[in-house]
Image (cartoon, rainbow, N blue to C red):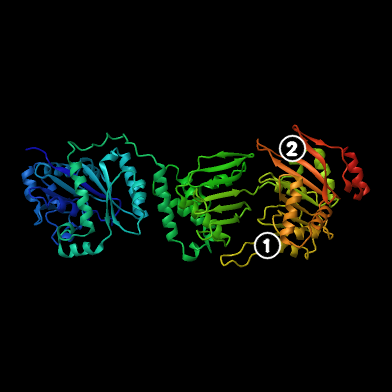
Amino acid sequence: MAVNGKVFAVFGSKGGVGKTTIALNLAALLARKKGRKVALLEINSIGGNLAAHLGLDAKPDFYSLLQEIQQAQPETVAKKLLAHRIGFKLLFSPTMPQLEEPADGKIERLLHLLTYTNDFIFVDCPQNLSPCTLGILDLAQCIIFVTTADIVSLQSASGVLATLAGEGFPMSKIKVLVNKFSNLSPPKEHLVKLLPVEVLGFLPDEPAPIAAAMNSGIPVVSNNRCGITRALEKMEKEILLFAQHKSPPSRLWPGQKTDYPAVSKEKWLAIKEMVQRKLLDDLSDQQIAGEKIEDYTANPQLAQKVKRLVAGFNLSDGADFSKQITSHLFGMGPLDRFLEDDTVSEIMVNGPGCVYVEREGKIQQTDCTFNDAEEIVRLIQRIASKLGRRIDESSPMVDARLADGSRVNAVLPPVSLSGPLLTIRKFSRQRFSMEQLVEMGTLSQQMMDFLKICVKARCNIIVAGGASSGKTTTLGALSAFIDPSERIITIEDAAELKLHQSHVISLEARPPNVEGKGEITIRQLLRNALRMRPDRIIVGEVRGDEAIDMIQALNTGHNGSLSTVHANSPRELLTRLEGMMLIASPSLPLLSVREQLAAAIDLIIYQKRFPDGKRRITKLTEVIGMENRQIQLQDLFEYRKGEFVSLGQLPKFAAELSPKDNEQLKSLAI
């Protein structure tokens, strides 16, 4: 008599995943073909429920056959199985738990004998990985591993599969069947990436046909054309194909381990999606809306919860992965490492494929990527929502700042043809002093001493330069020369300045809300600051109609103020300020505007970023007055041929300095 039967072991990731139902319906499905011999065995020493599914008494049970199994013959064993009317034979588990496990080798011999008289033997396996269970799995042509799509079952599945790999089972022998799949489950593609073995199929979550089948005692596939039946029929071809293998993939010798698949990027992303889904399920509507999200993320229990969820997936670097998931869900995701890197000054995200950073003034491409455009959009919307801002297709651009003061600009399609764009100019944690800027080669010691005199003498100074030329850094360093006893008011679009003095009032502009209301402009803040008894006013950047208020303030006794303006030269700075003032007040004569500028500004610091990434002050230029209706300028220092040079000109405002300041100025040998 030849051995023809193939054993298919149905094993579950945990209790309640539906392995008995699946084993029953797979056996019934294959038994529908006339002449095909199919047996279904329920092997469970703590009691089973296969008989309850069919409305039968649990007789015969496998314990009764094991008493004389060593001397039994295939025909004898076959006759003792219960023949069911739909075409297969049954062997049940006892209804009551048994105190003793079957003796080693008896279950294996039972299965071996059944392979002589059956084409297919389906075994509803015990839930635990006992020696008996491992023996059944070892004999099986294929292990059908049943799980559901919830995170607890998937974690259990990951642990069981890792254990089987450690026991030497080849992963190619195992096929996963995902039961109770619904619209609320994670996407199929995520589950396929998450599981380290091939997915046989997905069974829909349809409790009504299952309940009807149990009431009638007839398997679902024999009595109902539902989604479960259609899904199992698709799997039948795969099972028959696997049964054609000449011999089952065998387990390795004890002590040898099969290679458990490495954690691929796709699997990491799938696990991240599962954990995030679970965490979001725990959030209230208010937390999802962002009202209490900060409290939630600051809770130390969150980190512990993420660690517990990740631990179930048996990752070798679970601690790092836990941190990544928390970052992706509540932080800046893959950008966090650049925000923590003090050598990075700017981060540029050009769609999902490209992330660039600026280090030491040079732009570098990184290996960082986003999974898709939606991930970038979610990150942008999370940043905007924390500040009460809105960004979507109707309002596709936003300027914002992070909690540390870093400036953020975001642009969404359709305005951006390259996908969602995100630019972050980091707020430096370090407050640079003028001495440090001298060491970095931004200016010379002689220039620093000169600027110190100018600031203490309450000269009005404008720092000019192109984008990312270091204007704000220089402005902050200049402010260190202000006397600590003075009251300083800073006005900025996004608060960046960190001054050394204690008596500092910081004001920040506010954009309009979603309804277009509530905007507070730089101009409004500047007008209000004049009523706050300032000794010095520092405007982070002048770029609009606030220019006229600032210039008028400088001409009405608020000397010693500092500001920055985007410009490509000292002369262009004046031209830009002229334009801003005329836009704010078109009725002003051009000559009056120029006269006000000439009277208000004492010194222009022009700064430039060079191709090597270095930032240097290339000119210190004095505004000396009006001549022939033009503002006259005089260069005092220049950067020429790799060195800082004094042009030997004393500033015109030297006459207004105190004798002490004049002596210091002369000692500089300008």
Residue 155 or residue 185, whichever sits in front: 185
> Which one is earlier in the sequence, the residue at label 1 or at label 2?
2
Residue matched to label 2: 439
Residue 644, x across and y down, in percent:
78, 35
Q: Mark 1 touching mark 2, by CB under 8 A?
A: no
Does residue 75 sit above or below 278 in this rendering? above
User: Hey, what amino acid is under mark 2?
Assistant: Glu
Q: Residue 251 in the image: x percent, y percent? A: 25, 37
Q: Quadrant of residue 613?
A: top right
Residue 100 visible somewhere in the drawing: no
Farthest top residue in view: 641
Mark 1: few/some/many CA within 10 Å (<14, 14-19, 20+): some
Where is residue 638 shown, x and y percent of the image?
79, 38
Q: Nearer the viewer, residue 69 or 428?
A: 428
Look at mark 1 in the image and give the residue it sits on: 521
Q: Is residue 65 left or right of residue 627?
A: left
User: In the figure, is residue 666 to the left or right of 615?
Assistant: right
* Amino acid, disc 1: Thr
Q: Secondary structure at mark 2?
A: helix
For the image shown, how many numbered marks are present on the structure? 2
User: For residue 95, which quarter of the picture?
Assistant: bottom left
Residue drawn at (31%, 34%) of the image: 256
- Looking at the rendered structure, the secondary structure element under dot 1 is loop
How far across and down, in percent of the image, does residue 557 sit?
84, 59
Residue occupying the far front of the picture: 628
Quadrant containing the N terminus is top left
Q: CA distance from mark 1 to mark 2?
A: 37 Å
Q: Is residue 109 left or right of residue 467?
A: left
Q: Nearer the viewer, mark 1 or mark 2?
A: 1
